Amino acid sequence: TDIPFEHGMNEPKDATSSEKKYFEATKKWQMTEGAYSMIQSTKPQTLAYGLNDSPVGLAAWIIEKFKSWSDNNGDLEICFTKDELLTNLTIYWATQTINSAMRIYNEAMKAMINAMYNPLVKLNPFDKTGNKSEVPAAFAIFPKDISAPPKDLANRFFNVQQWTEMSEGGHFAAMEQPELLAEDIRRFVTAVQAQPQL
């Protein structure tokens, strides 16, 4: 799964050099690729009307992300077949679900705003006390993903037990590199299951 790294929204005062580099790269990425997130966060219904009304608009909106966020060296068909892309588009088009798919951005934005203005709410959604989660966590870092936190930042918030830096792949790893991702998940689950239970 892809879990947005909300913890990476604010640079720690004691940020390491790799964390500083991550925050700088994230800011740059937001300025060049992040507009989709803002519109999906603030006006998802308006955007959904346009995308549900136009199969070409829907295709342009989705395919542009596949092209920009995958490890394709400028050739989208290195990563995805036309059939895979058309299947993905058809699911959204036939079910009219681009709106519900974008709603997660709107809900995440509401939660962040609530956390910013409500002192009783912490930004860490995994632990309401704001402490580091003790649940075993694994990270699969794909080189062309849109925003991959450095391990030291992940360690601030998670009990990182597996950290895999993949040789290839991008944001849509489950479609782009399914074998690599599946093997990494299997390895993590096997390791966690082998641990003594509390």
Image (cartoon, helix red, strand yellow):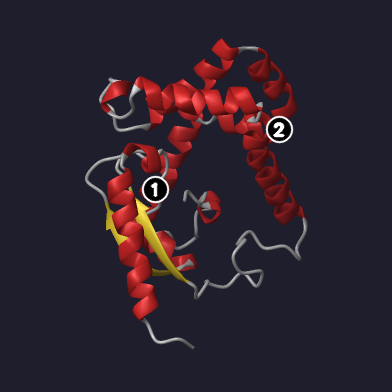
Residue 125 in sight from this viewpoint? yes
**For numbered disc 1, what is the local secondary structure?**
loop
Left or right? Give the position of 146 relative to 57. left
Res 45 quadrant in image:
top right
What amino acid is at disc 2?
A: Thr
Residue 39 in sight from this viewpoint? no
x, y percent for residue 111: 70, 51
Disc 2 crowd rating (10 Å Cα; few below 14, some 14-19, many 20+) is: some
Q: In this view, does 70 lie above or below 148?
A: above
Q: Given the current orientation, which residue lies at the most extreme left position?
A: 167
How many numbered badges does the structure rendering display? 2
Residue in the foreground of this view, choosing between 85 and 119: 85
CA separation in Å, label 2 and label 1: 24 Å
Disc 1 crowd rating (10 Å Cα; few below 14, some 14-19, many 20+) is: many
What amino acid is at disc 1?
A: Ala
Res 109 quadrant in image:
top right
Left or right? Give the position of 133 relative to 53. left
x, y percent for residue 124: 60, 62
Label 2 or label 1, whichever comes before in sequence order: 2
Give the residue at x 39% y 31%: 69
Give the residue at x 67% y 36%: 100
Can you tell which mark lies on residue 148? 1
Residue in the foreground of this view, choosing between 58 and 138: 58
Give the residue at x 35% y 66%: 188
Can you tell which mark lies on residue 42? 2
Can you tell which mark lies on residue 160? none
x, y percent for residue 38: 62, 32
x, y percent for residue 76: 32, 22
Contact between marks 2 and 1 (CB within 8 A): the answer is: no
**For numbered disc 2, what is the local secondary structure?**
helix
